[in-house]
Image: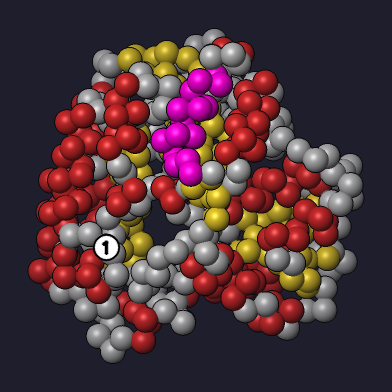
Amino acid sequence: MRFSIVNLGCKVNRVESDDVAAALISAGGSLARTSEADLVVVNTCTVTGEADKKARKAVRQALRANPSSTVVVTGCAAAIDAAAFTALDPRVRVVPKGALQQTLAPHAAPVALRVGEGFRTRVSVKIQDGCDHACTFCIVHVARGKATSRPFSEVRDEVAAYARAGAREVVLTGINLGSYRSEGRHLPDLLEALLADGEALPGGGPRLRVSSIEPQQVDRRLIELLARAEGRVCRHLHVPLQSGSTRVLGEMERTYTAPWFEHLIGRLRAEVPGIALSTDVIAGFPGETDDDFRETCRVVERLGFGRLHVFPYSKRAGTPAAMRVDQVPDEVKRSRAAELRLLSDELTQRDYDRRVGTRELALVEDGVAVTESYHEIPVPAGARRGDLVEVVMPPRGDARARMQA
């Protein structure tokens, strides 16, 4: 069977899509273009109203690309409103994520590793799903349900399997990663165990990277581990801010203030020298004033993030924020988002320039190498895809530095 996968949304979706691809390949399938595939899987996102529109558009494009293919729709948007997709065409089937592999590849190998052609050299391992929080702009906690965690031993076995298959970097991912709990053990316990396991694995095991983590869950133990792991756990964190205005944070139902967040970032920089930090910012949340926005810009610049992921606020039906009457005009949201993106470019360049001449380990991917601090640099001479090599950060002159997306 020839298949194609269309992935939308977050990094967790990417892992789940790659898991399906690996299972289908294990069962004898082969990757193909959408126009040539017998089966097209569309893994949807529903984090914003705009994401919903993109999901429906992707399904319609898949239907047009091949009039004889079966289109399976899964993911968060399908979990919220399956009927919106089945109404598009009789060829559309909606399958929940939990049943996807059993439905599409019941005869796949028990563990199908995402390695080789078509997969990234940096392997992501999902250790957690769901969320117990309910930010007023978000519906993911409805689509994915309560927070759940994979068993401790199961994660260790999967990371070891990837190490034996040649993976040199493993990224731990989840919807609310810092809420990981298994048999009374938390994320720092898991990292400690994986580091210990690596001592008996080829090359000392893969280096580990923590994906996006909520600021409230960056605790003392995680900071201490980052400080003493000597890069075996990458000294890089993506910590969502969302707004630099404490008033707006309260209306988002974020459970911290802007000064508290600034204190956390200051502590990270003090205790983990050279740490790279990136963040999420929402532009134009309902009721956001010019003063609120200016404060966000000041906080972001003061904290010196290496990259901003900027999201113009998009109403998501079913969330408290979408029902507010003080929506910010679209042209204002676009203008604020554009200003934040320019600031992001400047901050990324500054962060890169501070690192010129320092040494980091970089993972060679397709056409670029990704450093511990998450910057892209040219592939070092003689290095091959999948290698983890020490580099001296090269100068870039006036060229814009880019952080890995």
Q: Which residues are magenta?
A: 184-198
Q: Residue furthest top?
A: 382
Rendered residue at 35%/39% (across/down): 237
Residue 336's image quarter? Answer: bottom left
Residue nearer the viewer, 311 or 147: 147
Q: Measuring 20% from the left and 42% from the top, which residue is drawn there?
A: 265
Mark 1 neighbour class, 10 Å CA radius: few under 14, some 14 to 19, many 20 or more: few
Q: As rendered, which of 312 and 72 lies closer to the eye?
A: 72
Relative image position of residue 271 (x, y in whole percent):
21, 29
Residue 330 against residue 119 in the figure, above or below: below
Residue 99 appears in view = yes
The residue tagged 1 is 255
Image coords of residue 25 (percent x, y):
81, 41
Classify 394 as above or below 74: above
**In percent of the image, x 82 and y 73: which residue is there?**
91
Quick one: SS at disc 1?
loop
Counting from the top left corner in percent of width and height, residue 268 is at: 23, 36
Amino acid found under the numbered disc labelled 1? Thr
Q: Quadrant of residue 210?
A: top left
Quadrant for residue 102, please give it.
bottom right
The one nearer the camera, 171 or 197, is: 197
**Colour scheme shown:** secondary structure
Residue 300 as seen in the image, left or right of residue 212: left
Q: Is residue 286 left or right of residue 16?
A: left
